[in-house]
Each structure stands twice: as C-alpha cells, then as structure tokens.
Amino acid sequence: MNKEERINLAGEIMLDFAAQTGVSQENKSPRRYLWTDAFAVFNFLELYHRTQDEEWLMLARHLVDQVHQTLGRHRPDSASSGWLSGLGEEEGARHPTRGGLRTGKKVDERAPDEPMDERLEWERDGQYYHYLTKWMRALGHMSRVTGEAGYLRWAMELAQTAHRAFRFSAAPDGSFGLHWKMSSDLRRSLVPSVGQHDPLDGLVTCCELLFAARGFTDQELPDLEREVRELTGMCRNRDFSTDDTLGIGSILVDACRSGELIINDAFQDIALFQRMVHDGLLSLEDLAASFLDQQARYRLAFRELGLSIGLKGAARLARMFEEYPDARGGELAPRLQPRLEAMLWFHKMSSKIEAFWIEEMRKGTEHWRTHGDINMVMLATSLVPEQFLRSG
C-alpha cells in the first residue's frame, strides 16, 4: 500500500467514525469515549496536515468540544450534575478539564459501599490516568496546529488535576505512585494498583507540554515542574518490559517522543530514555510472534494496532538519530544504534498486523465490530501515525 492509498483509507475510516459516533452528524447523539477520541483528534490533525482540507480541522475542533461537554461533566444518570470540577457553567466552560474527564464507559462507576468486581470494573466509568495523558497530548497538538494557546492551557490544567488526584504515597520512604483508576469526581480510588507505564507516560507528556509552551511565551500557562520532578522519581529503577502488545507499543511510542524531546533539549533524563529503548527491545525479543498466525477470535485488533504504531515509532526514532547524530554532544547515537537496528528487524510485523485487520474490517466481522470505534481509530493511526508520534 503506497502513501496515497494509506491516506485515502485513513480518511475513509475517519469519516465513517465521525458519522457513526456523532461528530459530523448534528442529529445523532454523540458517543464519546476518551481513549478513542484522543486518537481520533490526532488522526483528524494528520489528515488536515496531509491534505490542507479545513474539514478535517473542523472535525477535530468539534470533537474536542463534544468530549469536554460530555466527558467533562457528570453522567446524565448520575446523582450529581454539571462540570466534574464543580465550577459554575461559565467558569467550567472556560476550564473544562479542571475536574478531569470521564472515560465514557457505558456502566456507571460502583458506589462507595459496593464491593469491587474485577471483571465488571473494566466496563465501569471513572477516570484512568493513561486516558487523560492521551487527551493532554491531543490538546497540545491542537494548540500547535491552530496556534491557539487555549488548547494547551486546558492540557496543562488537566496535567495538574490528574497528578494531584492520582498521586499517592504509601511507601515508608515517602515515594509516590499513581492510582490506576479514580472515581469520576476524583475523590476516591476505584483501583488502587499502579499502572506499569503510567508514570512514564505522564512524565513524557508533561515534558512535551512544557516544550509546546515554548511557542507561547506571551501567554501565562500553568507550571508543570513539580509534576515533572515527582514523575521522574516514580520512574526511577522501574522495569518497563512487558509481554502485552499494547504495552510494548506504548513504551516504543514514549521512547520515540522522548528521543525527539532530547534532540530539542526538552527531556533531560538520558538514563531513563536508554531504559525505555532497552526495555522496549527486550519486550519485542520476548514477544511470541506466533500470535500473527492465530484466527481473529483469539486476537484483539486495538492492542495489536498499538504495537504496530509503536513499531513505526521505533523506526522514526532510528531515523531521527541518523539525522541528528550530534544530539547530546554525539555520545548518545553510537550507544543507541545497535538497539535501534535490532528494533527495525521487527518492523515487518507492522504491515502484517495492518493487512490482517484491514481485511477483517472490510469483511465486517463480528469480532471487528465488537470494538469497532477503537479499532477504527487505531487502524487509521497506524496508517498515518506521524501526528501521534510527534512530541510537539
């Protein structure tokens, strides 16, 4: 599939997504889900960049507004109403992310006195830190593309809110962690365990937002230095290796973003960056590639497509350090080269993953349709990943 075919297919997918979920049809009730919508914003912006068609930028703007108006507020079936932040209507509209954003799950979160059902918890509403970081990034990119600082301000306010709400200290040494899942009002933990990559994703995202803020020196924007400092501490001596395809994709994307930030002198922890590359390669080497031969019913498209996106991030990282061999005084590229070359050996998996799920999408199989929205946007991201992989 050549570049033009990839752009055209991604465009078809995103127009279908916009129609199905109520982004482009005013008479259709919006179906908003934060993770999916974050990827959709990146895709709309990439298609705008590729085609200069203002329709794509309009869809991105409209989707951002819908997410804030839907997921920035309490559920219609909740006992509470209004903005999650508790702000009044006008002030809440000016700061729609100050209370965080709900995931958009179909089932309401469990009551405070209700025992946790681990299986059902995946279907319940609330707030996930790693969903919020995706939306922070989407808003940051909206600012860069439109030149409007308001989107970046919302992203940085969300970063502060999320850090304050999810951060906890239960260790004797006073070190911090991040809760996996919080209630919609951010007042109680729903899943207290710590996500493996959440602190890393939060750190890279905060550095990315601070880098974006350099383009708005005339604006008074939130300060994220405390968040960066504490998230850096959470990442120390942490093992990021995983056997989960989506998790591997995540660490490869974070490594790609960090590499670009390093080149732009916006990410300082070189040891942590090298840990990302090391653990990303280790995870790839341990991955059982036999999953590519399994039938669709034993596979999950969006998780595999996350890996495909990450593999493209690894290739982009390798190209960046070829183009900028003198980054960090030239001492970094020679250390990275063997590992980056080893990562490139796995790149062919990306095209195989895409081809398999494009066929499933075209056949309209039940397995594809079960997670149709998220499958669609992540396939489109894999086809045109540049906006998602950029750090600013």
Image: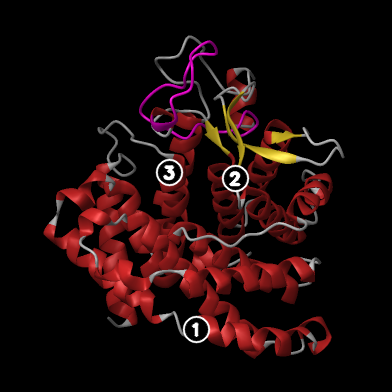
Q: Quadrant of the N terminus?
A: bottom left
Q: Do the residues under discs 1 and 2 have CB atoms within 8 angstroms?
A: no
**Label 3 crowd (10 A; few <14 / some 14-19 / many >=20):** many
The residue identified by callout 1 is: 344
Query: As drawn, which residue projects farthest toward the left?
Result: 363
Q: Is residue 101 left or right of residue 277?
A: left
Q: Amino acid at mark 1?
A: Leu
Check disc 2 and report the residue beneath it. Answer: 195
Depth check, front residue: 331 or 102: 331
**Helix, strand or loop under label 3:** helix
Q: Residue at x 12, y 60 (%)?
A: 363
Q: Report x, y in % for residue 150.
A: 64, 45
Amino acid type shown at disc 2: Gly
Name the residue at 60% across, 50% down.
Answer: 196
Tell me the colour scheme of the image. secondary structure
User: How far is mark 3 from mark 1, CA to CA?
Assistant: 35 Å
The amino acid type found where label 3 is placed reads: Leu
Mark closer to the chain start, 2 or 3? 3
Q: Nearer the viewer, mark 2 or mark 3?
A: 2
What residue range appears in magenta?
97-119
Residue to which mark 3 is pinned: 63
Q: Magenta stretch containing residue 116, yes or no?
A: yes
Image position, residue 127 (x, y; %)? 54, 33
Q: Callout 2: few (<14), some (14-19), or many (20+) C-alpha neighbours within 10 Å?
A: some
- Which residue is depicted at the point 15% across and 62% down? 362
* Closer-to-camera residue (99/172): 172
